[in-house]
Image (tube, helix red, strand yellow):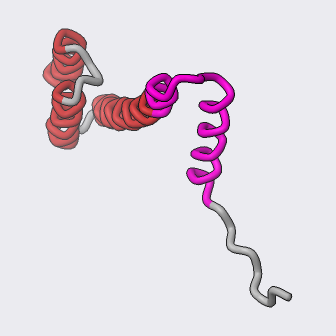
C-alpha cells in the first residue's frame, strides 16, 4: 500500500509528545498544563545558557593552565560576554555573575 519508507521523528519531537502526555496525566486545569509546558521550555533554555557559560569558563581555565596570556585574555572577554548575557536573561543573579567574572579575571591577571 505505502511504497515510501516511514519518516523518522526527531528526538525533540518525541520529547515534546512525551511531555504533552505527562501534562495530560498530571494536571486537570488548563493553566496548570500550560505552566508545566512553559516550565519545561524555560528549564531547557536556562540549561543551554548555563552550559555555554560553563564551556566559556573552562576555555579560560584551559588557557590559564597552558600559560598563554594572550589567548587567556581573548577567551576571558568571550566568557565575560556570555556571563553578562546569561545575567541579562535572568539565568544568573547579578552577584553570581560578578563573582564568576571576578574569579576568572583574577586567574588571568595572576599569570606572569
Magenta run includes residue 22: yes
By secondary structure, the bulk of the magenta-drawn segment is best described as helix
Depth order, front residue of 27/112: 27
Where does the C terminus fall, quadrant-wise? top left
Residue at position x 38%, y 36% from top? Answer: 45
Residue at position x 66%, y 41% from top? Answer: 18
On the rendered structure, is 71 left or right of 62?
left
Depth order, front residue of 88/27: 27
Magenta run includes residue 71: no
Asked if 38 appears above or below 8 in the picture, the reply is above
| Position in image of residue 104 (x %, y %) | 22, 22
The answer to whether residue 62 is visible is no
Where does the N terminus fall, quadrant-wise? bottom right
| Position in image of residue 43 (x %, y %) | 43, 29
Asked if 52 appears above or below 35 in the picture, the reply is below
Depth order, front residue of 56/82: 82
Residue range (magenta): 10-37
Asked if 83 appears above or below 95 in the picture, the reply is below
| Position in image of residue 20 (x %, y %) | 60, 39
| Position in image of residue 80 (x %, y %) | 17, 31
Asked if 64 appears above or below 92 in the picture, the reply is below
Residue 72 occupies quadrant: top left
Residue 53 occupies quadrant: top left
On the rendered structure, is 17 left or right of 30?
right
Amino acid at each position: 500500500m505505502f511504497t515510501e519508507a516511514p519518516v523518522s521523528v526527531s528526538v525533540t519531537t518525541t520529547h515534546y509528545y512525551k511531555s504533552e502526555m505527562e501534562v495530560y496525566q498530571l494536571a486537570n486545569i488548563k493553566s496548570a498544563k500550560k505552566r508545566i509546558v512553559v516550565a519545561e521550555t524555560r528549564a531547557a533554555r536556562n540549561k543551554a545558557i548555563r552550559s555555554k557559560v560553563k564551556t566559556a569558563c573552562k576555555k579560560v581555565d584551559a588557557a590559564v593552565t597552558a600559560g598563554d596570556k594572550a589567548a587567556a585574555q581573548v577567551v576571558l572577554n568571550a566568557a565575560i560576554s556570555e556571563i553578562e548575557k546569561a545575567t541579562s536573561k535572568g539565568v544568573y543573579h547579578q552577584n553570581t555573575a560578578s563573582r564568576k567574572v571576578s574569579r576568572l579575571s583574577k586567574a588571568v591577571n595572576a599569570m606572569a
